[in-house]
Amino acid sequence: MKQDSKLILAMSEGDMGALAELYKRYAPGVRNFVTGLIKDKAKAEDIVQNIFLRLMSSNPSFESVAAFRNWLFICARNEVVSTLRSKWESQVDKVQVLPEGVSDDIQPDVMMNLLHPVLAKMPRKRAEVFRMSKLNGLSDEEIAARMGISVRTVEKHLELARREVSVYLS
């Protein structure tokens, strides 16, 4: 049985047999990792196959077995995030469909009054970021500049605020 490092080198030189052997060795672990995250065996299998297809088509080179293994699991995590994001966005699209005759032109101040109970329970900065974004229509960059925090921090506050609002509304 070939060592993984020799298989990785052979795969990088276009040896499909080496890729198949690496698939046999690494796919089960990656599949278990993905299944643990998304709890859907069929979707996990699709993700694993996509990763190995990408490996076959992009043919990256790896300096070590650890680098190869890291690449596989980073790709798996990224695919899971993409899958969950697209699933979440499709759920949001369903929520945004309103019955005929119902307007989605809700005034920002009315929205804030409806959300007051959940906003009152949020940490002060998170609620302020949410208000600046939804009530004032400011971009993440504008909020960051006004509050003296990073754009990433603004994004995190908005993500957590959306979760809290979602729980409150459900």
Image (tube, rainbow, N blue to C red):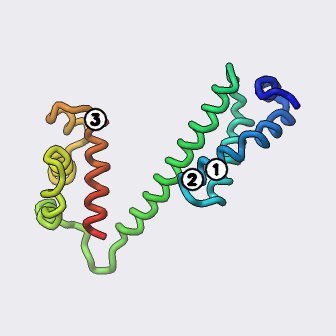
- In the picture of the structure, the residue carrying the numbered disc 1 is 32
Q: Residues within 10 Å of mark 1 (few under 14, many from 20)?
A: some
> In the rendered image, is residue 12 in sight?
yes
**Residue 75 occupies quadrant:** top right
- The quadrant in which the N terminus is found is top right
> Mark 3 and mark 1: span between their CA atoms?
34 Å
Residue at disc 1, secondary structure: helix
Viewed as shown, does residue 43 lie left or right of 19?
left
> In the figure, residue 30 lies in which quadrant?
top right
Q: How far apart are marks 2 and 3 (CA)?
A: 31 Å
Going by the numbered disc 2, the residue's amino acid type is Gly
The residue most toward the top is 63
Which residue is nearer to you in this view: 51 or 102?
51
Question: Would residue 148 appear left or right of 67 to someone viewing this image?
Answer: left
Secondary structure of the residue carrying tag 3 is helix
Give the residue type that dot 3 points to: Val
**Residue pointed to by mark 2:** 36
Q: Alpha-carbon distance for marks 2 and 1? A: 6 Å
Q: Mark 3 points at which residue?
A: 151
Sequence-wise first label, 2 or 3: 2
> Where residue 141 sits in the image (x, y, percent)?
25, 36
Q: Is residue 78 left or right of residue 101?
A: right
Residue at image coords 21%, 66%: 105
Mark 3 neighbour density, 10 Å: few (under 14) some (14–19) many (20 or more): some
Q: Which of marks 3 and 1 is in front?
A: 1
153 in relation to 93, above or below: above
Identify the residue at image location x=17%, y=31%.
148
* Amino acid at dot 1: Asn
Name which residue lies at 31% across and 70% down. Answer: 170
State yes or no: discs 2 and 1 in contact (Cβ < 8 Å). yes
Q: CB under 8 Å between callouts 2 and 3?
A: no
Residue 71 is left or right of residue 53, and the answer is: left
